[in-house]
């Protein structure tokens, strides 16, 4: 099993910055790609950014520029700069876990709340 725990969320004023963390524990050798998602009130969960085990990154087109994903082994980070009220959401970490070559699944953290005041 793999467990993901996010942290770093909070209440911040527009224009500020936050750095979110997601720490994986358990059978971390089976973790491959990891990602950050977010879900705003009343909206569907959306992809923010992904990062492979080798460090390659990809961002949602609409969010490029203010978000930076990084990885240190089995911990990933999301740096968010120039925060806007519309960034208010619960931010979730996801990991793709592959216990065997033939089988993989996604596991999620519990989320961390980011609230941006205007």
Image (cartoon, rainbow, N blue to C red):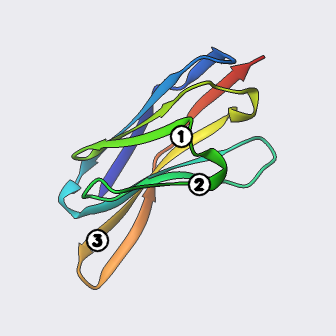
Q: Position of residue 87 (x, y in %)?
A: 68, 34
Residue density around tag 3, few if under 14, some if 14–19, many if 20 or more, within 10 Å? some
Who's the residue at 23% across and 81% down the image?
101
Which quarter of the rendered picture does the N terminus lie within?
Answer: bottom left
Residue density around tag 1, few if under 14, some if 14–19, many if 20 or more, within 10 Å? many
> Which residue is at the far bottom?
102
Residue density around tag 2, few if under 14, some if 14–19, many if 20 or more, within 10 Å? few
**Tag 2 near tag 3, CB within 8 Å:** no
Earlier residue among tags 1 and 3: 3
Query: Considering depth in this image, is 58 or 112 the residue closer to the camera?
Result: 58
| Cα–Cα gap, marks 2 and 3 | 24 Å
Earlier residue among tags 2 and 3: 2
Relative to 54, is 15 on the left or the right? right
Q: How many marks?
A: 3
Task: Please tell me whether residue 1 is drawn above or below residue 24 in the rendered image.
Answer: below
Relative to 93, is 30 on the left or the right? left
> Which residue is at the far front?
65
**Where on the picture, by quarter, is residue 23?**
top left
Classify mark 1: helix, strand or loop.
loop
Who's the residue at 34% across and 49% down the image?
3
Residue under label 1:
111
**Where on the picture, by quarter, is residue 20?**
top left
Q: Which mark is residue 60?
A: 2
Residue under label 3:
98
């Amino acid at each position: 099993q793999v467990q993901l725990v996010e942290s770093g969320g909070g209440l911040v004023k527009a224009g500020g910055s936050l750095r979110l963390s997601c720490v994986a524990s358990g059978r971390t050798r089976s973790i491959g790609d990891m990602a950050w998602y977010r879900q705003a009130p009343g909206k569907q969960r959306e992809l923010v950014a992904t990062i492979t085990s080798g460090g390659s990154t990809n961002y949602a087109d609409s969010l490029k520029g203010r978000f930076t994903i990084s990885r240190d082994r089995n911990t990933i980070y999301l740096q968010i700069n120039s925060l806007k009220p519309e960034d208010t959401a619960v931010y979730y970490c996801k990991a793709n876990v592959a216990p065997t070559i033939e089988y993989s699944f996604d596991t999620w953290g519990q989320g961390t709340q980011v609230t941006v005041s205007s």
